[in-house]
Image: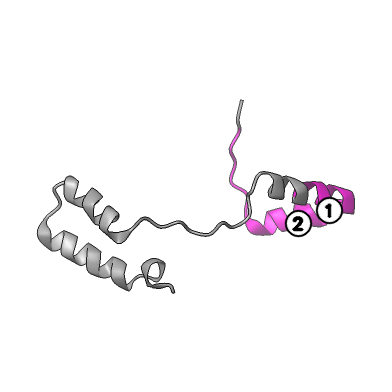
Amino acid sequence: MRLAINISLPNILTLISQMSLNEIEQVKNKIVEKELYFKTFKKDKLEDVMSDFQKEDYSDDFLKDLENGLKKSSAYNEN
């Protein structure tokens, strides 16, 4: 059984502040073990993304706007 709840960042920080150092260490180890920390964004090639949208019969104007927007986006503009 899985339970999902939304907890705000301030509530998480309050809970952590009430934990012992040992408990905090256990949480840290689980974060590392489950690789919950930030991972590098692995983007698809722009051509592949555009190909996927073209297969869905979007209009040429939409596809052109999408491609121009993606080319200007931070995800596709990083060095």
- Note whether 44 is above or below 77 in the view shown: above
Q: Quadrant of residue 21?
A: bottom right
**Residue at label 1?**
18
Residue occupying image coordinates x 82% and y 51%: 25
**Residue 42's image quarter?**
bottom left
Q: Which residue is mark 2?
A: 14
Measuring from the top left, give residue 74's x and y in whole percent. 40, 71
Q: Point out the residue furthest to the left here.
A: 60
* Screen quadrant of the C terminus: bottom left
C-beta proximity under 8 Å, tags 2 and 1: yes
User: What segment is highlighted magenta in the picture?
Assistant: 3-27
In this rendering, position of residue 68 left or right of residue 60 = right
54 and 18: which one is in front? Answer: 54
* Colouring convention used in this rendered image of the protein: one colour
Q: Which mark is residue 57?
A: none
Magenta segment: does it hold 33? no
Query: Circle 1 sits in a helix, a strand or a loop, which is it?
Result: loop
Is the N terminus in the top left, top right, bottom left or bottom right quadrant? top right
* Label 2 crowd (10 A; few <14 / some 14-19 / many >=20): few
Spot occupied by residue 4 in the image (x, y as percentages of width and height): 58, 38
| Distance (Cα) linking label 2 and label 1 | 7 Å
Relative to 70, does residue 12 appear above or below in the rendering? above
Answer left or right for 57 relative to 40: left
Residue at point 73%, 45% (across, down): 30
Helix or strand or loop: what does disc 2 sit on?
A: helix
Q: Position of residue 44 (x, y in %)?
A: 36, 55
Q: Position of residue 5 (x, y in %)?
A: 60, 41
Magenta: main secondary structure: helix
Q: Is residue 2 above or below residue 72?
A: above
Q: Residue at x 28, y 54 (%)?
A: 49
Q: Nearer the viewer, residue 72 or 22?
A: 72
* Left or right: residue 34 compared with residue 23: left
